Amino acid sequence: MERLDGQRAMAISEQIIDLYHRCYSRPPWSETPQQLSDYPGKLADATARPGFTAITVMDTEQLVGMTYGWPTRNVRHDDRMERAVVSAFGPDRADELIGGAFAVAELFVDPDAQGRGIGRRLMENIVDGRDAAWLVTHAQAPAAHLYRSLGWKERGPLPGDVYRLRLSLFTLRAFDNGDT
């Protein structure tokens, strides 16, 4: 496992893009050719965010797993996912749920390497030492089971126009008693 900042992640961007395509061209995501071709720009934007952090797993020379994200200092209304959380929960509750938390933007593990605990280790590592984290995923996606098993709480669905699949907000707090 290796921790990368934005510059180091961009240095292996070809490998990241290849892994992304292997993961997101398949169900349940089945991203369109346009969505897949838009990913390099999304990756460049993500790596430029303040506090960007990535964790990678290599199998010999091939990237087989990655997660990344950044701190959510204040809820931004120019960020599509943060806007969707505000729309779903209202500004005050959105700030309680995701303000000051680490946003886990992506987790992907090569389909041929799944079932070996790579995703679990990536998620444990990316949130280690953080008081709070949040992510958005399809509640029926295979990774949603992993998140729940790691103590993440599903907070509820986001508006249906955010993505082709209905997405839900998940949060993790080091001090969470399940009520917040």
Image (cartoon, rainbow, N blue to C red):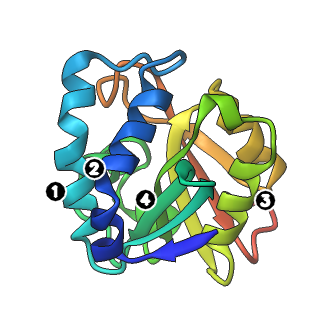
Q: Nearer the viewer, residue 51 or 89?
A: 51
Can the viewer see residue 85? yes
Find numbered disc 3 in the image and state the secondary structure of the residue it sits on: loop
Q: How far apart are marks 4 and 1 (CA)?
A: 14 Å
What residue sits 40% from the left and 41% below the top? Answer: 88
Q: In which quarter of the image is the N terminus?
A: bottom right
Q: Is residue 29 left or right of residue 163?
A: right
The answer to which of marks 3 and 1 sits earlier in the sequence is 1
Residue topped by disc 1: 78
What residue sits 43% from the left and 16% below the top? Answer: 30
Q: Which amino acid does label 1 sit on?
A: Asp
Q: In which quarter of the image is residue 74?
A: bottom left
The answer to which of marks 4 and 1 sits earlier in the sequence is 1
Q: Distance between the residues labelled 2 and 1?
A: 7 Å
Residue topped by disc 4: 94
The vertical placement of 97 against 138, above or below, is below
Q: Is residue 130 left or right of residue 33?
A: right
Q: Where is residue 73 in the image (x, y as percent from the top left)?
A: 35, 78
Tell us which disc is closer to us: 4 or 1. Answer: 1
Disc ID at residue 100: none
Q: Which of 137 and 179 is in front in this view?
A: 137
Q: What residue type is labelled 2?
A: Arg
Q: Contact (CB < 8 A) between labels 3 and 4?
A: no
The answer to which of marks 3 and 4 sits earlier in the sequence is 4
Q: Contact (CB < 8 A) between labels 2 and 1?
A: yes
Find numbered disc 2 in the image and state the secondary structure of the residue it sits on: helix
What residue sits 30% from the left and 48% below the top? Answer: 14
Q: Is residue 54 left or right of residue 2?
A: left
Can the viewer see residue 180? no
Q: Contact (CB < 8 A) between labels 2 and 3?
A: no
